[in-house]
Image (spheres, rainbow, N blue to C red):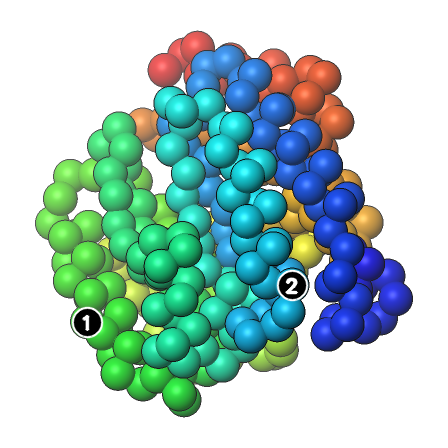
Amino acid sequence: MKAWAIGDCDNGGDEWGEEIKLTEQAVQAINQLNPKPKFFVLCGDLIHGMPGTQWRKDQEQDLKNVLKNIDQDIPLVFVSGNHDIGNVPTPETIDDYCKHWGDDYFSFWVGGVFFLVLNSQLYFDSSKCPELKQAQDEWLDAQLAVAEKQTCKHVIVFQHIPLFLQNPDEDHDYFNLEKSVRQELMEKFHKAGIKAVFSGHYHRNAGGSYKDLEMVVSSAIGCQLGEDTHGLRVVIVTAEKIVHRYCSLNDLSSQGIEKELMDLIKQN
């Protein structure tokens, strides 16, 4: 937040006390949710310090110290972002991330729903690790084949960089994927029956649709680049649909899940 405020991304990352407080508030809000969430996913950029920068280790340790207080019955799911493995990732930066936070891509099942976590930096710029991108591509194709064959209620993807921010045909920039890469992924996802992709990266809420695939872009617990407040997105998955709301940390802490979402949960 300081780096953004002073306009110096490289040298402004020397203070993160405010981020610690906000993450503690997020953890507290999550722990008091009733019913308990099936899991809590952080959609990338776990910390600000890029690979090789001086404050990175301390930021990682401080984040882990806060996240240790999450209810033991609420699993944590981590997604790699550009600040975690670099805008141009290397085998070394990805290996370092995996040692600290777990695999950079994987799949899991919860309640008949199939979830895929992807390393979107490999779609942004894999010039320094082409063999790792190829490995993820092959793995993804195999996972999507599983999704097509299995009778899963839904298939949902988590990745840091959005496919697009509002429109599937929008121009490529820093906050979305290059158009040819985007098109290929959107078609793959659509064919496999994926209903939603959840991303971060933009530090603002956004989103749109491609055919029956919803692209959901969530703002951050920490630094806001738009008009949104520090918050979390609450997602309710039923047999028929996926419903979500972005909630400010203050509202979630004081009021919990809003009535409309609670009614959905009770019906299922």
Q: CA distance from mark 2 to mark 1?
A: 35 Å
Image coords of residue 47 (percent x, y): 59, 56
Dot 2 alpha-carbon crowd within 10 angstroms: few under 14, some 14 to 19, many 20 or more: some
Q: Is residue 57 above or below residue 247?
A: below
Dot 1 alpha-carbon crowd within 10 angstroms: few under 14, some 14 to 19, many 20 or more: few
What residue is shown with label 1?
138
Residue at the left extreme, as displayed: 149
Q: What kind of element bears circle 1?
A: helix
Image coords of residue 172 (percent x, y): 58, 79
What number is the disc on residue 211? none
Residue in the foreground of this view, choosing between 194 and 106:
106
Is 184 positioned to the left or the right of 256 in the image?
left
- Sequence-first tag of 2 and 1: 2
Q: What kind of element bears circle 2?
A: loop
Image coords of residue 97 (percent x, y): 41, 63
Residue beneath the point at 43% across and 49% down: 78
Residue at the top extreme, as displayed: 266
Residue in the foreground of this view, choosing between 177 and 27:
27
What residue is shown with label 2?
55
Residue in the foreground of this view, choosing between 200 and 266:
200
Q: Is residue 262 above or below residue 119?
A: above
The answer to whether one can see residue 38 in this image is: yes
Residue at the right extreme, as displayed: 6
Residue beneath the point at 41% across and 55% down: 100
Kindly identify the amino acid type of the residue bearing the numbered disc 1. Answer: Glu
Image coords of residue 129 (percent x, y): 35, 83
Residue beneath the point at 19% across and 71% down: 138
The answer to whether one can see residue 183 in this image is: no
